[in-house]
Amino acid sequence: MAFHIEGLLDAGERVPKAHGLAAFAGRLEYAGRTWAVVSVDLATLSGKSRRLNVSLPERVVRRIDAAAAKSGESRSGFLARVALDAV
Protein backbone atom coordinates (compact mmCIF):
# COMPACT_ATOMS: atom_id res chain seq x y z
CA MET A 1 0.00 0.00 0.00
CA ALA A 2 2.84 2.38 0.86
CA PHE A 3 4.37 1.74 -2.59
CA HIS A 4 1.05 2.61 -4.28
CA ILE A 5 0.62 5.79 -2.24
CA GLU A 6 4.19 6.85 -2.97
CA GLY A 7 3.46 6.35 -6.69
CA LEU A 8 0.44 8.63 -6.40
CA LEU A 9 2.56 11.27 -4.65
CA ASP A 10 5.31 11.01 -7.27
CA ALA A 11 2.71 11.52 -10.00
CA GLY A 12 1.38 14.61 -8.23
CA GLU A 13 -1.94 12.91 -7.53
CA ARG A 14 -3.99 13.23 -4.38
CA VAL A 15 -3.95 10.38 -1.86
CA PRO A 16 -7.55 9.14 -1.49
CA LYS A 17 -9.14 9.66 1.90
CA ALA A 18 -9.21 6.51 4.03
CA HIS A 19 -12.56 4.80 4.56
CA GLY A 20 -13.61 2.07 6.93
CA LEU A 21 -14.56 -1.35 5.63
CA ALA A 22 -18.24 -0.58 6.12
CA ALA A 23 -18.05 1.89 3.22
CA PHE A 24 -17.31 -0.99 0.82
CA ALA A 25 -18.76 -4.12 2.43
CA GLY A 26 -22.26 -3.64 1.02
CA ARG A 27 -21.16 -2.89 -2.55
CA LEU A 28 -21.87 -5.67 -5.03
CA GLU A 29 -18.63 -5.18 -7.00
CA TYR A 30 -16.65 -6.11 -3.87
CA ALA A 31 -18.68 -9.22 -2.96
CA GLY A 32 -16.55 -12.26 -2.12
CA ARG A 33 -13.33 -10.23 -1.82
CA THR A 34 -10.74 -10.55 0.91
CA TRP A 35 -10.54 -7.50 3.17
CA ALA A 36 -7.61 -6.03 5.04
CA VAL A 37 -6.90 -2.87 6.99
CA VAL A 38 -3.44 -1.35 6.74
CA SER A 39 -1.83 1.67 8.34
CA VAL A 40 0.57 3.82 6.31
CA ASP A 41 2.62 6.56 7.95
CA LEU A 42 2.56 9.30 5.30
CA ALA A 43 5.42 11.10 7.03
CA THR A 44 7.79 8.35 5.87
CA LEU A 45 6.82 8.65 2.20
CA SER A 46 7.68 10.99 -0.66
CA GLY A 47 11.36 11.60 -0.17
CA LYS A 48 13.42 13.53 2.29
CA SER A 49 11.76 14.71 5.47
CA ARG A 50 11.96 18.34 6.48
CA ARG A 51 11.97 19.39 10.10
CA LEU A 52 9.50 22.09 11.08
CA ASN A 53 9.28 24.07 14.27
CA VAL A 54 5.60 24.63 15.06
CA SER A 55 4.19 26.10 18.26
CA LEU A 56 0.80 24.84 19.36
CA PRO A 57 -1.14 25.08 22.61
CA GLU A 58 -0.53 22.06 24.86
CA ARG A 59 -4.21 21.08 24.75
CA VAL A 60 -4.00 20.91 20.94
CA VAL A 61 -0.87 18.75 21.10
CA ARG A 62 -2.62 16.40 23.56
CA ARG A 63 -5.58 16.05 21.20
CA ILE A 64 -3.28 15.45 18.22
CA ASP A 65 -1.32 12.82 20.14
CA ALA A 66 -4.52 11.07 21.25
CA ALA A 67 -5.90 11.01 17.69
CA ALA A 68 -2.56 9.78 16.31
CA ALA A 69 -2.38 7.00 18.89
CA LYS A 70 -5.98 5.97 18.18
CA SER A 71 -5.22 5.64 14.47
CA GLY A 72 -1.87 3.91 15.07
CA GLU A 73 0.19 6.75 13.60
CA SER A 74 3.10 8.85 14.76
CA ARG A 75 2.41 12.51 15.50
CA SER A 76 4.24 13.47 12.29
CA GLY A 77 2.37 10.89 10.23
CA PHE A 78 -0.96 12.01 11.61
CA LEU A 79 -0.23 15.68 10.92
CA ALA A 80 0.99 14.85 7.40
CA ARG A 81 -2.19 12.89 6.64
CA VAL A 82 -4.48 15.58 8.01
CA ALA A 83 -2.60 18.30 6.13
CA LEU A 84 -2.77 16.35 2.86
CA ASP A 85 -6.50 15.85 3.36
CA ALA A 86 -6.89 19.61 3.79
CA VAL A 87 -4.96 20.76 0.71
Image (cartoon, rainbow, N blue to C red):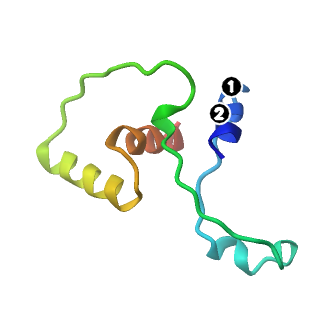
Q: Nearer the viewer, residue 82 or 36?
A: 36
Query: Looking at this view, is 67 or 41 the one in front?
Result: 41
Q: Position of residue 18 (x, y in %)?
A: 58, 56
Q: Which residue is mark 2?
A: 6
Contact between labelled residues 2 and 1, with CB atoms less than 8 Å apart:
yes
The residue drawn where x is 58% and y is 68% is: 20
User: Horizontal placement of 21 versus 84: left or right?
Assistant: right
Q: Position of residue 59 (x, y in %)?
A: 14, 50
The secondary element bearing badge 1 is classed as: helix
Q: In the image, which disc is placed on residue 84? A: none
Q: Is 29 or 4 nearer to us in this picture?
A: 4
- On screen, residue 45 versus residue 14, left or right, reads left
Answer few, some or many: residues within 10 Å of disc 1's Cα (few below 14, many 20 plus, some between 14 and 19): few
- Mark 2 secondary-structure assignment: helix
Name of the residue lying farthest toward the right = 29
Q: Residue at x 52, y 44 (%)?
A: 85
Q: Give the amino acid type for the residue marked by disc 1 in the picture.
A: Asp
Residue 20 in the figure: left or right of residue 48: right
Find residue 10 and name its label. 1
Q: Residue type at mark 2: give it.
A: Glu
Gap in angstroms between the C-alphas marked 1 and 2: 6 Å
Above or below for 21 versus 14 = below
Asked which quadrant contains residue 34, the reply is: bottom right
Q: Residue at x 19, y 52 (%)?
A: 62
- Quarter of the figure with residue 5: top right
Count the labels in the image: 2
**Residue depicted at 71% across the width and 78% down the height:** 25
Instruction: Tell me which corner region of the image, top left, top right, bottom left or bottom right, holds residue 32.
Output: bottom right
In the image, residue 64 sits, relative to residue 27, either above or below, namely above
